[in-house]
Each structure stands twice: as structure tokens, then as C-alpha cells.
Image (cartoon, grey):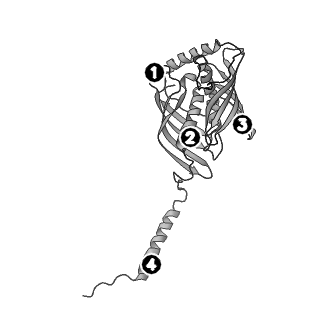
Amino acid sequence: MQPRRPPAPALLLSLWLLLSLAVRAAAREHPDVPARPPAAAGLPRGILQLAARAALHFFNFRAGSPSALRVLAGVQEGRAWVDPQEGCEVNLVFSTERYNSEEEAEERLGKCSARVFFKNQKPRPAINVTCTGLTEKMKRQERDYLLYKQVKQLKSPLDIVSIPDSHGHIDPSLRPIWDLAFLGSSYVMWEKTTQFLHYYLAQLTSVKQLKTDNDGIDFDFTVLLHEFSTQEIIPCRIHLFWYPSKPLKVQYHCQELQSPEEASGMEEASAMAPTELSNF
């Protein structure tokens, strides 16, 4: 018996061509299923932390409660995708802590999950956020009303040079004013955030309490916002109207070289896109 001859090179080439054609034909059967961009392609550094802070700015404004203010503790997990034509989508889970805890024994940590979508380099990202482990509603309302009474009893006009002072100290009697400024600034910082720019409240430089015909608190603030990537300090004037358990109303104007629609805005918490505030 003669040994079997190996396949000729021409036969192997023909088989390879047939296999390639079959693979291409299979791909053409599903033309409407686009490949999702790689998770790491074109993402700015620190995008998960930036998205978490944007979600918290949005959350704080929507909550409308100085007693419910939260800050970022850490990002547990997350993933981001970039579409060059649409923008950047971030899905993440992160932990938070109370911004101003009055009781040391009270649980400070909470947990949030969020979807944040940055429309290319435009500000005001679209956000859906759900948070748990928050202060009980009754306790939060009691603290808000106590803060409300403290502010109503302040002398007018307020003689305030800056909060914090040059040593970074906030006088306890002025803490309610700072917390309200932080609350109003949350809206401004969320609306100005992009996938490359993010802000933090650095200082409150002036406060003017306005007289109202109702029981609400009406303030004009001037604040300094710190933009991290450029290290710029941006002055913003914020008009805030607040009453416990009512939607927060904010108007603002920031002094910077950009188009008017990006430099100023106004909003009421009840008019925002839907979100979930667990334990609220």
C-alpha cells in the first residue's frame, strides 16, 4: 500500500478562501448590530470619579435639602464607552458620605448607582442616579427646619467677608449659610460639568439676604468655583430660593469667556429629568 499524499498547496488555498467567504457572509446577515466601542478608547483620565461627582451634584440639587448633602467617598466599580459621534456613557457604582454629620455615631456612608451620559464636550450631562443608606426622611426634615430657623434669625444685612476664612475655618454660626451655598452651587456645578471639566465649591465671598413676601429663604450668593483640569477659579453669582421640603429654585451667572447659554441658567428642582432618591 502506498502512503497517502499530503494535500496540494492549491487545495489548501482553496479551502482557506471558502472559509473566509463563509465568515464574511455570516457577518453580512447581521448588519444592524454595531460593535460597541472599546471601553478604554478615548476616555479622559479619571472619568469614573468625574462621573460620580457629576451624579452627586445632580443628586444634591434634586434632593433640595442641606441636611441630605452627600460627597464622594469612593468608586467601587464602573465602565465607560466613547462614541465619537454621540459622546461618552458611564455606568458606575460608588459610595458616599454625609457632607456635614452632626452625630458622630450616625452612619455616614451610603451607596449610589448611576448612569451618566456626556454629550461629546457639551455641559449638563444626562444623569439617572439611585442612592441608598441615606438619612431618614423624618430626621432630615427636622434638621432642615432647624437650619431654616437659624437662618431666619440671622442679622440682616449679613456682614460676611468670606467662608471659609483665610485659615479654612467655618464659624458654626455661619455653617447654615455655607450649606445653602453648597446646595445652590450643586446645580451650577452639575450644569457646567463636561467629560473633561469638573468643579468644586472653593469659597463663598458675599451673601445678601433678600426680603420676601412669603416664608421662604431668598439669598444672593457670590461663590468661587474651582475647575480642576484648568485650575481656574470662576466667580459665580447665585440667586437661591429655599423652603424646607419644597423644590429648590436656582438662578446663576458666571464670569467667564463663553457663550451666554453656558455661562448662566435657571432651574427648579421639580422641573428636572426623573431620578430615583431611595430613602427620600
Residue 197: assigned label: none
Residue labelled with disc 2: 50
Q: 256 or 142: which is nearer to us?
A: 256
Q: Amino acid at mark 4?
A: Leu
Mark 2 surroundings within 10 Å by alpha-carbon count, few (fewer than 14), some (14 through 19), many (20 or more): many
Q: Amino acid at mark 2?
A: Leu
Total count of labels:
4
**For discs 4 and 3, the disc positioned in front in the rendered view:** 3
Mark 1 surroundings within 10 Å by alpha-carbon count, few (fewer than 14), some (14 through 19), many (20 or more): few
The Cα atoms of the two marked residues, 4 and 2, are separated by: 53 Å
Q: 145 or 130: which is nearer to us?
A: 145
Residue located 53% across and 56% down the image? 35
Q: Secondary structure at mark 2?
A: helix
Judge whether 172 appears above or below 20 on screen. Answer: above
Can residue 17 be seen in this snapshot?
Answer: yes
Residue labelled with disc 4: 13
Q: Amino acid at mark 1?
A: Glu
Mark 4 surroundings within 10 Å by alpha-carbon count, few (fewer than 14), some (14 through 19), many (20 or more): few
**For discs 2 and 1, the disc positioned in front in the rendered view:** 1
Residue located 43% across and 82% down the image? 10
Q: Quadrant of residue 2?
A: bottom left
Judge whether 244 appears above or below 125 on screen. Answer: above
Say whether disc 4 or disc 2 marks the residue closer to the N-terminus.
Answer: 4
Say whether disc 4 or disc 3 marks the residue closer to the N-terminus.
Answer: 4
Say whether disc 2 or disc 3 marks the residue closer to the N-terminus.
Answer: 2
The Cα atoms of the two marked residues, 2 and 3, are separated by: 20 Å
Residue labelled with disc 3: 263
Query: Residue 230, how many percent across, how many down?
Result: 64, 42
**For discs 4 and 2, the disc positioned in front in the rendered view:** 2
Say whether disc 1 or disc 3 marks the residue closer to the N-terminus.
Answer: 1
Residue 104: assigned label: 1
